[in-house]
Image (tube, rainbow, N blue to C red):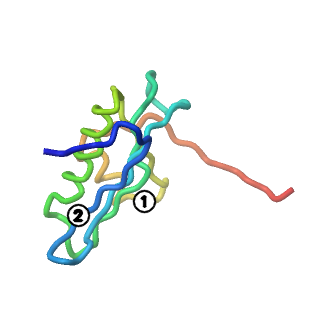
Amino acid sequence: MQHYQSDSTAELFVCEAGNQLVGFAHVQLRYDYVEGTSTSPCGYLEGIYVKESHRQFGIGKKLLEVCEDWSRFMNATEFGSDVELDNETSAHFHESLGFKEVNRIICYAKKL
């Protein structure tokens, strides 16, 4: 059973194997618009990583499930994430766990 703080708008969950950190997931509530959603707040996967040597064991899936559970606990009814256009590994991970692509964008910046 997980226990969450109700006064936080972000959490970091980690996975350890022995005394070694092998993965993490950062989740946050977003109150601004999240592509493809219509409610606020929305749980948002800000980042997730599992060491390559520990992939394919369900660690990423479990970390995502904990982030989704935390988001539900925080009264979010939708969950979002993003992936760089060329990050096919991350895109496959997201799609394999039920995410649906809702938009593609190109961001621009310039120095003033």
In the image, residue 28 sits, relative to residue 33, either above or below, namely below
Residue at mark 2: 15
Residue 47 is labelled as: none
Residues 111 and 9: in front is: 9
First in sequence, mark 2 or 1: give its number.
Answer: 2
Residue drawn at the location 45% of the way across and 47% of the way down: 82
Position of 105 with respect to 68 (left or right) is right
Name, please, the residue furthest toward the right.
112
Quadrant containing the C terminus is bottom right
Quarter of the image for residue 77 reads top left
Q: Amino acid at mark 1?
A: Asn
Residue 47 percent coordinates (x, y): 41, 55
What residue do we see at 36% from left, 35% from top? 79
Give the residue pinned by disc 1.
87
Image position of 104 with respect to 46: above or below: above
Q: Nearer the viewer, mark 2 or mark 1?
A: 2
Give the CA distance from mark 2 to mark 1: 23 Å
Q: Is residue 48 left or right of residue 107?
A: left
